[in-house]
Amino acid sequence: EVDEQSKTKLVMDNITTTLSMTNGSKLEMPWNSNTKTIELFLKPADAGVYTILSGSGGWNVQLSGSLDDDYGYIIFSGSSASITSDRLPIFNNRFFGISLSTGSFGLKMDVRQAEKDRTIFENSYTSSADNSFGNGSKLWVGGNYSGSLDEFRLWKIYLIYSLDYRFTH
């Protein structure tokens, strides 16, 4: 849905609109290496192995799971840092959030899924390896990912509390 006032805003609210992506769909945008936090909420169509984010600086975020299982892993891979989540129910037909933050501490990955007032999972992972999402000039969302995407955000600051608690599906 395009905001009629600015014609530049894509409103994704999981109530009336989400961005549906099929295998091969990709959003490409200019990348500013000053970005300190990336947040997104997604609901994969099926279990599998998907690249959901990648940067021309040499990093990516993948989902990995078996077709016969609701559980899988979220994996960040970069030139100097790698983080793999615990086995989580990310293929259970519900939205979940991923937040990646970088700073002098290294890299932090937060993942969260909630339904109304019930938290299904909320985990945080860190790597002390120096990582600033690289110095590339492009960011891609999608690629071989199939599913829905909602509330994609880029921040120039490190967010201490990420994955907004208002987002509960």
Image: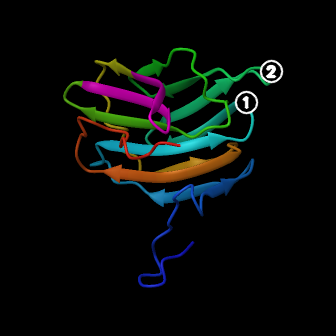
| Residue 22 visible to the viewer | yes
Q: Position of residue 35 (x, y in %)?
A: 30, 48
Q: Residue at x 61, y 30 (%)?
A: 63
Q: Is residue 53 left or right of residue 161?
A: right
Can you tell which quarter of the image residue 133 is in?
Answer: top left
Number of other residues with Cα within 10 Å of mark 1, as a class: few under 14, some 14 to 19, many 20 or more: many
Q: Are marks 2 and 1 in contact (CB under 8 Å)?
A: yes
State the SS at label 1: loop
State the SS at label 2: loop
Q: Residue at x 54, y 58 (%)?
A: 28
- The verdict on residue 139 being magenta is no
User: Magenta residues, as a range?
Assistant: 106-123
Can you tell which quarter of the image residue 146 is in?
Answer: top right
Q: Position of residue 76 (x, y in %)?
A: 48, 27
Q: Note whether 27 is above or below 124 in the view shown.
A: below
- The verdict on residue 119 being magenta is yes
| Residue 56 visible to the viewer | no
Name the residue tied to disc 2.
Answer: 68
Q: Position of residue 67 (x, y in %)?
A: 79, 25
* Outermost residue toward the front in this view: 117
**Dot label at residue 47:** 1
Number of other residues with Cα within 10 Å of mark 2, as a class: few under 14, some 14 to 19, many 20 or more: few
Q: Residue at x 49, y 19 (%)?
A: 85
